[in-house]
C-alpha cells in the first residue's frame, strides 16, 4: 500500500479522520471495530499496541502479540494502521509488521531522550509520523520533538493536539489550552495539526464539542477513539465512541471555509483576529478564576478579622508582575497599570465582603 504524503495538506479531503480503539484487546474486538469504521469511510485506523501508563498496574497493551492481528486486518480491509511507539524496539517491531504510521505519545514527547532514541531508529526510514503534544503545557518541548524527528529525515509529519495535564480544569480530562496549538501553527504553518478530542474530553458526550471547536479553529483533522463496545473497553472506556456513534458525530460536524472570498490580505487578517479572539477568551477565563480566588481571600479575611489591604503583599505583586512581563517581552509599565486596576477591583470586592452583615 502506498505511503506517500499522508500528512501533506493537499493529499486529502479536509478534515482527515483517524479512528480506532484506545487499546487492541482481542482479534474479534479489533476486526469488529475496523469493519464498522471502514463502513463509515475511515481508512486510517489508530490502535494501541504498547500503552505507556502513568501508574504501574494499569493495562499497558498487549505489545507484539497484537501485530499479527493488524497484519490480518490489513489483508482483509483497505486500511492503513497507526500505532504509538515509545522506544527503538517498538519502531523495529512495527516496521517488521508493516505498520503504516507511527505516533509519538504525550508521555514520550515530554522526554527529549526518548524522542531522540526514536528519531535515531527512524533514520533512513520512509514512514509518516505524528507527534502528540507533551503532557505539560510546554511549547518548546513539542517543537523540540518535531525538530528531532525532522532531523532524522522524516518529512511526512503531523502533530496531534491532545490537551495538557491541568489540575484546575475539572471539565476536561486534559485541558485544551488552545493558545498552545495555535502558537505552534504560527511557527509551523506547513504541518498538519490534528486534534484528539477523545483525550481532551475524557467522556464521550464532550467529544463532539471539542471536535467542532477544533474544526472552528481550522484544524486539519481529528484522531478519535472508537470501540465496538466502549463500555467493555479495557482502557479509556468513558471516552470511546462506537463506529455508529462516530458516524453520527461526523455527519453533524461543520467544516468552515478557510478563507474569505476576498483578497489574501483579508484572509491573513481574519486568521490573526481569530487567534486574538481565542487569546482574549483564555485571558478572560484566567481573570474570572483570579476574581474567584479574590473572593475566597475576602471571606478568609472576614472570618479572621484581618484588614483588606495587605501592603507587603501588594508591594510584592507590584514588583514581580512587571518583572515577569519584561522577561516575556511585554511592556512592564502596561502590566503595572493593569495590575493596579486589578488591585482596585480586589479591594472593592473584599471590602464589600467584609461590610456584609
Image (cartoon, helix red, strand yellow):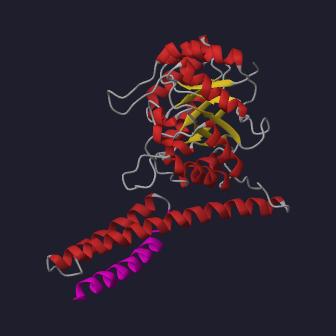
Q: Write the start and end of the magenta stretch as one range.
A: 330-357
Write the residue at 22% across / 77% down.
310
Q: Residue at x 45, y 27 (%)?
A: 51
The front one of 248 and 145 is: 248
Extreme-left residue of the structure: 304
Quadrant (top left/top right/bottom left/bottom right) for the C terminus: bottom left
Residue 231 within the magenta-colored segment of the rendering? no
Q: Is residue 31 left or right of residue 107?
A: right
Q: Main secondary structure of the magenta part?
A: helix
Q: Is residue 8 left or right of residue 50?
A: right
Residue 206 placement (x, y as % from top left): 53, 51
User: Which quadrant holds residue 178?
Assistant: bottom right
Against 286, is 49 above or below?
above
Task: Give the farthest residue toward the right.
Answer: 262
Rendered position, 123 above or below 267 = above
Q: Is residue 340 magenta?
A: yes
Q: Is residue 108 above or below residue 181?
A: above
Residue 136 is drawn in which quadrant? Answer: top left
Query: Who's the residue at 56% across and 27% down the image?
Result: 47
Q: Which image quadrant: the N terminus?
A: top right
On the question of residue 124 being in view, the answer is: no
Of the pair 11 and 182, the residue shown nearer to us:
11
Q: In the image, what residue occupies the spot 47% across and 58% down?
A: 328
Asked if 299 appears above or below 23 in the picture, the reply is below
Image coordinates of residue 253 in percent, x first then y, are 69, 51
Question: Left or right: 110 with respect to 247?
Answer: left
Amino acid at each position: 500500500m502506498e505511503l506517500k504524503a499522508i500528512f501533506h495538506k493537499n493529499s486529502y479531503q479536509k478534515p482527515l479522520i483517524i479512528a480506532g480503539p484506545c487499546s487492541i484487546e482481542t482479534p474479534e474486538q479489533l476486526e469488529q471495530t475496523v469493519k464498522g469504521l471502514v463502513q463509515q469511510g475511515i481508512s486510517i485506523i489508530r490502535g494501541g499496541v504498547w500503552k505507556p501508563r502513568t501508574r504501574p498496574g494499569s493495562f499497558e497493551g498487549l505489545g507484539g502479540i497484537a501485530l499479527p492481528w493488524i497484519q490480518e486486518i490489513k489483508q482483509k480491509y483497505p486500511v492503513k494502521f497507526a500505532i504509538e511507539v515509545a522506544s527503538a524496539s517498538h519502531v523495529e517491531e512495527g516496521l517488521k509488521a508493516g505498520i503504516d504510521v507511527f505516533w509519538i505519545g504525550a508521555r514520550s514527547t515530554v522526554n527529549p531522550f526518548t524522542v531522540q532514541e526514536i528519531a535515531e531508529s527512524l533514520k533512513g526510514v520512509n514512514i509518516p509520523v505524528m507527534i502528540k503534544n507533551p503532557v505539560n503545557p510546554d511549547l518548546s518541548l513539542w517543537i523540540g520533538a518535531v525538530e528531532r524527528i525532522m532531523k532524522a529525515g522524516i518529512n511526512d509529519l503531523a502533530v496531534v493536539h491532545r490537551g495538557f495535564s491541568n489540575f484546575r480544569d475539572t471539565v476536561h480530562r486534559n485541558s485544551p489550552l488552545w493558545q498552545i496549538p495555535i502558537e505552534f501553527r504560527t511557527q509551523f504553518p506547513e504541518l498538519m495539526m490534528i486534534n484528539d478530542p477523545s483525550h481532551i474530553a475524557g467522556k464521550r458526550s464532550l467529544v463532539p464539542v471539542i471536535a467542532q471547536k477544533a474544526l472552528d479553529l481550522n484544524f486539519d483533522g481529528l484522531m478519535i477513539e472508537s470501540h465496538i463496545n466502549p463500555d467493555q473497553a479495557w482502557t479509556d472506556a468513558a471516552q470511546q465512541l462506537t463506529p455508529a456513534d462516530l458516524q453520527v458525530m461526523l455527519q453533524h460536524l461543520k467544516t468552515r471555509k478557510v478563507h474569505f472570498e476576498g483578497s489574501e490580505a483579508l484572509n491573513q487578517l481574519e486568521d490573526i483576529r481569530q487567534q486574538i479572539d481565542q487569546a482574549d477568551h483564555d485571558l478572560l477565563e484566567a481573570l474570572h478564576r483570579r476574581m474567584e480566588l479574590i473572593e475566597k481571600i475576602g471571606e478568609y479575611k472576614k472570618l479572621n478579622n484581618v484588614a483588606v489591604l495587605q501592603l507587603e503583599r501588594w508591594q510584592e505583586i507590584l514588583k514581580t508582575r512587571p518583572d515577569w512581563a519584561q522577561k516575556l517581552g511585554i511592556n512592564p509599565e502596561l502590566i503595572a497599570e493593569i495590575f493596579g486596576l486589578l488591585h482596585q477591583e480586589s479591594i472593592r470586592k473584599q471590602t464589600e465582603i467584609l461590610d456584609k452583615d
